Amino acid sequence: MSKRRTPSMMTTEEAQRQETYIKQIRMQNDLEKSKTSKQKHYYIATFGCQMNAHDSEKLAGMLEQMGYQKTDQENEADFILYNTCCVRENAEQKVYGKLGYLKYLKDMNKDLIIAICGCMMQQDTVLNIIKSKYPHVDIIFGTFNIYKLPELLQTYLETKETVIDIWNEHKDIVEDLPSIRKYKFKASVNIMYGCNNFCTYCIVPYVRGRERSRQPEDILNEIKELVADGVKEIMLLGQNVNSYGKTLKDGISFAQLLRKVNEIEGLKRIRFMTSHPKDLSDELILAMRDCDKVCKSLHLPFQAGSTEILKKMNRKYTKEQYLELAEKIQNTIPDIALTTDIIVGFPGENEEDFKDTLDVVRKVRFSGAYTFIYSKRTGTPAATMEGEVPEEICQRRFNELQEVLQPIVYEKSQEFYGKTVEILVEEKSKNKDSYLTGRTDSGHLVHFEGDTSLIGQFVNVEIIEAKTYYLIGKLAN
Ligand code: SF4
């Protein structure tokens, strides 16, 4: 675990205000600890995407500053926080189920504080359900004001009444929140928030608001501090990183930002996600080619192959444009690993449309893909579209997609066989004792036998076995 903090860099009044609450709560907790000898613990459950995971790192950072210590045992915690996601409806059901269990914990421990935040809270219907069915939740906040956690907690501690603070839009981007990283050697950095694209199946623009980019200096300073703290690999995060800078006065592009990040001394690898094909410029492809630290992997969701379906999805590109773009990227950066997202069974998808999806898979030859059967997301335009595809047809198409996709992914993986590649060692293997797990520049997972002292280091491994979704290697140096 690594803590990061730059008190001298607090750039907004808001952050300073929160600093005051952090100190107040810290004092109360320290005082209580000196009387009872009991350390207070926090537990955070994170649902959903990397943006949420990164928000949770910031929330954890604030909680630790306030004197709470992390626990992985919910029943040991004095403060429980659920950071929710609403991209898929079944994730919501899971949250409701867990909230029921928290009632039991609260009955056992009246001092337990329960908080819930994240995308789900940005929806009025969800908020009403929480208020009416789960009154044991003490603090509720949304996606735009996570930095206010100290103030909300202090308000709750003073009033012991449910605190609800949900904003419908962003105000300022608050810089320099304390943050707890899972890994000492790699970190995520938000470069922008929100999305303007309104893909018709997606709830994100409604719950994360409009696009706004962080100032390049703030991003570069944050990365420099991370590097000084031991970080070797960074992931630049945004819902649509390719349109980074469009909301800034001085109009810096994502490609320009990437070139600046590439110059940071001591940093070894740069990754980014997510890229929208419609905004992926030639300038960016060239920057990726030229910048030696930018990893040779690109996640470029195409979602559906049929131009007709893409139109219904409001993706703003055609099948031909996507194929052209993929080809251009592969020609310019020959060793790039392209990965993607694919949805089958979008409303109105017929057999011809589905064949277009298979055609794109065959032509681009992806190194990996997240594949989904379309699931209705209440509150999005697609949820009320006609032409629902019956479940059994969706399932059959999904299976067919796997039959085409998997052999390609396997063949791409085989290209590594016998090669020696550099990997950043991340952790102990979850499946095999004495094995470690790392990632290649291309994002491929490699398991190999090695000592835990290698975690956080770059090592060379020779690939001795190539499976569809991972590689097996042996130390080459
Ligand atoms: S680009 Fe589309 S899918 Fe991605 S977050 Fe924005 S609206 Fe959702």
Image (cartoon, rainbow, N blue to C red):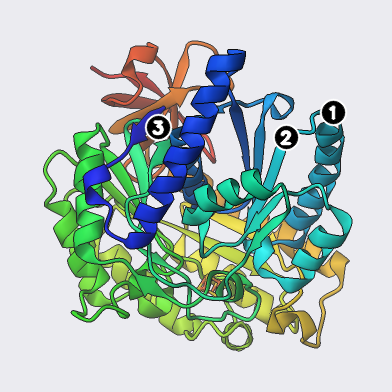
Mark whose residue sits in front, 3 or 2? 2
Residues at marks 3 and 2, CA–CA distance in whole angstroms: 29 Å
What residue appears at the point 55 percent right and 19 percent down from the top-left corner?
Answer: 33
Tag 2 secondary structure: loop
* Image marks 1 and 2: residues in contact by CB distance under 8 Å: yes
Residue under pointer 1: 108
Ranked by sequence position, the earlier of labels 3 and 2 is 2
Mark whose residue sits in front, 1 or 3? 1
Q: Nearer the viewer, residue 455 or 462?
A: 455
Residue 408 pos. (x, y %): 52, 52
Q: Which mark is residue 435?
A: none
What residue appears at the point 53 percent right and 32 percent down from the top-left corner?
Answer: 28
Tag 3 secondary structure: loop
Residue 124 pos. (x, y %): 74, 72
* Image marks 3 and 2: residues in contact by CB distance under 8 Å: no
Q: Which mark is residue 112?
A: 2
Residue 152 pos. (x, y %): 58, 53
What residue appears at the point 31 percent right and 61 percent down from the top-left corner?
Answer: 12
Res 48 visible? yes
Q: Nearer the viewer, residue 367 or 7?
A: 7
Residues at marks 1 and 3, CA–CA distance in whole angstroms: 34 Å
Tag 1 secondary structure: helix
What residue appears at the point 47 percent right and 78 percent down from the top-left corner?
Answer: 210
Residue under pointer 3: 183
User: Residue type at mark 2?
Assistant: Leu
Residue 41 versus residue 62 in the image, above or below: above
User: Residue type at mark 3?
Assistant: Tyr
User: Residue type at mark 1?
Assistant: Met
Residues at marks 1 and 2, CA–CA distance in whole angstroms: 9 Å
How many other residues sit within 10 Å of disc 3, few (<14), some (14-19) or many (≥20)? some
Tell me the quarter of the image containing the N terminus: top left
Residue 40 pos. (x, y %): 59, 25
